[in-house]
Amino acid sequence: MSKPKPGEISLAHNGVLFLDELPEFERKVLDSLREPMETGMVTISRAAQQVDFPARFQLVAALNPSPTGHYDDKRATSEQVLRYLSKISGPFLDRIDLQIELPRLSTMQLQSEHVPETSEIIKERVDRAYEIALQRQGKVNGMLSNRELALYCKLAEGEKLFLAKAVDKLQLSPRSYHRILKVARTISDLDGYPDISMLALKEALSYRALERLISQLTRY
């Protein structure tokens, strides 16, 4: 009997696993990532043995939001776009903290000579936020349990009401709710704020782009 060997996600342990053209993967393959994304482990069970492999990786995925390239190019109906996106299950999507839509760049933007922040400057800001999280709770925000969220991600009444309404409107799951809190906590840390601000909540919600698109398409 062959001995189980680590696969791609275990080989990506403490690194990055990049999946391009996400909807082209079989749904069952993507759903098999759900447990490792949650626990950081892969368990392979055979008749005579069970082996656990570490798999705490950073998942980065890319996709076109429509089979034709873009959902507003009028080359696909809402039903066709939904059928294409349905290859990505809701529970899998729940586990992706940052869903960002990259708009088409104008010619002016393509020709711009504006120099963005350097990686060194960004790294300094990230390092400061990392140290803030460690000093406050002994771990990074992404590793907080639901019980710890109540301690370290408290919201004022106005922010709590705003988030509740937004989650209901977008029909987000409890897991998405908790992940929005963690992202908002990190945004506030990056900005040097001790409390989660309304601006941080709004920015965290803006990073649920794919869920917003699906919610929009299902209304028609």
Image: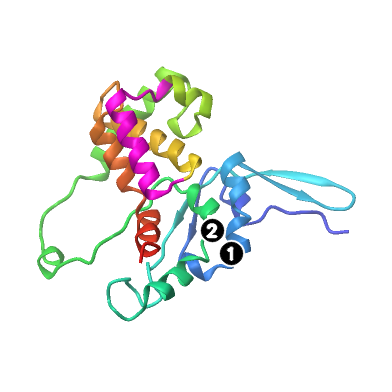
Residue range corresponding to the magenta coloring: 152-172
Front position in the image: 81 or 188: 81
Q: Which mark is residue 27?
A: 1
The answer to whether residue 111 is above or below residue 126 is: below
Residue at 51% over, 71% down: 24
Quadrant of the drawing holding the C terminus:
bottom left
Residue 113 x/y as whole percent: 10, 59
Front position in the image: 182 or 122: 182
SS class of the residue under badge 1?
A: helix
Mark 1 in CB contact with mark 2 (< 8 angstroms): yes
Front position in the image: 67 or 143: 67
- In screen coordinates, is 29 left or right of 151? right
Q: Residues within 10 Å of mark 2 (few under 14, many from 20)?
A: few
* Residue type for callout 1: Arg
The answer to whether residue 20 is above or below residue 208 is: below
Magenta part, dominant SS: helix
- In screen coordinates, is 2 left or right of 66? right
Residue 118 x/y as whole percent: 22, 45
SS class of the residue under badge 2?
A: loop
